[in-house]
């Protein structure tokens, strides 16, 4: 399995911190946001390469970061230099697939979100379902539902439909940018782009994909921290304590083990 890290955004709402520095490399406690994510994932022992997809403005920061790690990290420059010329997350995914000739299962994550639970349970869940999988959490605020991807899910966790930033949300299930594409579905990403699916938010691809092939949604057993602006970054710096250490839990027949 390869892990693609979406890190080509410009984080304009975090200026001046991110005007010349990438958000995923900001520090929370003693680690970068990206280190928190990758250290947890690497403990699952299933990823043999981490691919950071970034822009031309920030590529040197990520290459310096990668040089300081023992993890197998490849840093790709998508060639963009401003928020106005960015490719969008879906095009960045396809860019990495074509550049590296990727044909295996792909764990795709946003490099600027933190979780207080281990992604190892999500990986185990996808292996049990053997489909492309997304994560979901219950969001009671309708106002927040207008700003994110919202999924309709059946009793077996299958995504029946999904919509990015819906005017009239059909459920309270939000889908953060953490996905596992099974190898058989990876070629469909190019087809989805050609069919006109949205390419800015990765959830737009899932909205198209769930009508083509089975997609299941793993219910998150903890909290996601979306660092969108200076206030949320300061809150995370004050409150984040890493991945919660708890005994193994059961979810959908899969052992969820935390660090």
Image (tube, rainbow, N blue to C red):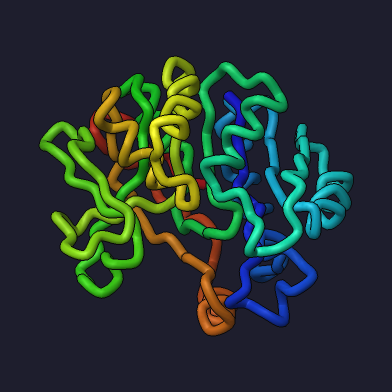
Q: Quadrant of residue 207?
A: top left
Does residue 43 show up?
A: no
Residue visible at 58% across and 77% down in the picture: 13
The residue lying furthest to the left in this view is 155
Q: Pick whichever, 117 or 194, lies toward us.
A: 194
Q: Horizontal and vertical percent for residue 69? A: 82, 44
Q: Quadrant of residue 251?
A: top left
Q: Horizontal and vertical percent for residue 136? A: 31, 49
Q: Quadrant of residue 149?
A: bottom left
Q: Pick whichever, 135 or 71, lies toward us.
A: 135
Residue visible at 71% across and 72% down in the picture: 18
Whether 250 is drawn above or below 79: the answer is above
Q: Horizontal and vertical percent for residue 20? A: 79, 70
Q: How many marks?
A: 0
Residue 106 lies left or right of residue 135; in this view the side is right
Residue 37 lies left or right of residue 217; in this view the side is right
Residue visible at 47% across and 42% down in the picture: 119
Whether 160 is drawn above or below 66: the answer is above
Whether 187 is drawn above or below 175: the answer is above
Q: Quadrant of the N terminus?
A: top right
Q: Horizontal and vertical percent for residue 258? A: 46, 45
Residue visible at 55% across and 32% down in the picture: 44
Does residue 213 show up?
A: yes
């Amino acid at each position: 399995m390869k892990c693609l890290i979406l890190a080509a955004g410009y984080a304009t709402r975090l200026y001046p911190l991110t005007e010349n520095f990438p958000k995923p490399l900001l520090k929370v406690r003693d680690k970068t946001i990206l280190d928190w994510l990758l250290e947890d994932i690497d403990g699952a022992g299933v990823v043999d390469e981490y691919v950071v997809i970034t822009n031309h403005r920030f590529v040197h920061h990520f290459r310096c970061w990668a040089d300081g790690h023992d993890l197998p990290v490849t840093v790709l420059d998508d060639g963009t230099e401003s928020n106005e010329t960015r490719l969008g997350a879906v095009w960045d995914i396809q860019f990495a697939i074509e550049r590296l000739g990727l044909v295996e299962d792909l764990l795709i994550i946003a490099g600027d979100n933190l979780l207080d639970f281990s992604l190892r349970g999500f990986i185990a869940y996808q292996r049990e379902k053997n489909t492309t999988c997304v994560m979901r959490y219950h969001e009671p605020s309708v106002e927040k539902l207008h700003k994110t991807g919202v999924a309709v899910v059946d009793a077996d966790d299958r995504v029946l439909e999904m919509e990015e930033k819906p005017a009239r949300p059909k459920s309270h299930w939000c889908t953060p940018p953490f996905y596992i594409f099974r190898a058989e579905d990876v070629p469909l990403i190019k087809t989805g782009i050609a069919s006109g699916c949205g390419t800015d938010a990765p959830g737009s691809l899932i909205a198209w994909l769930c009508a083509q092939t089975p997609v299941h949604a793993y219910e998150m057993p903890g909290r996601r921290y979306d660092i969108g602006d200076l206030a949320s970054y300061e809150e995370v710096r004050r409150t984040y304590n890493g991945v919660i250490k708890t005994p193994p839990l059961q979810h959908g027949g899969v052992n969820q083990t935390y660090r």
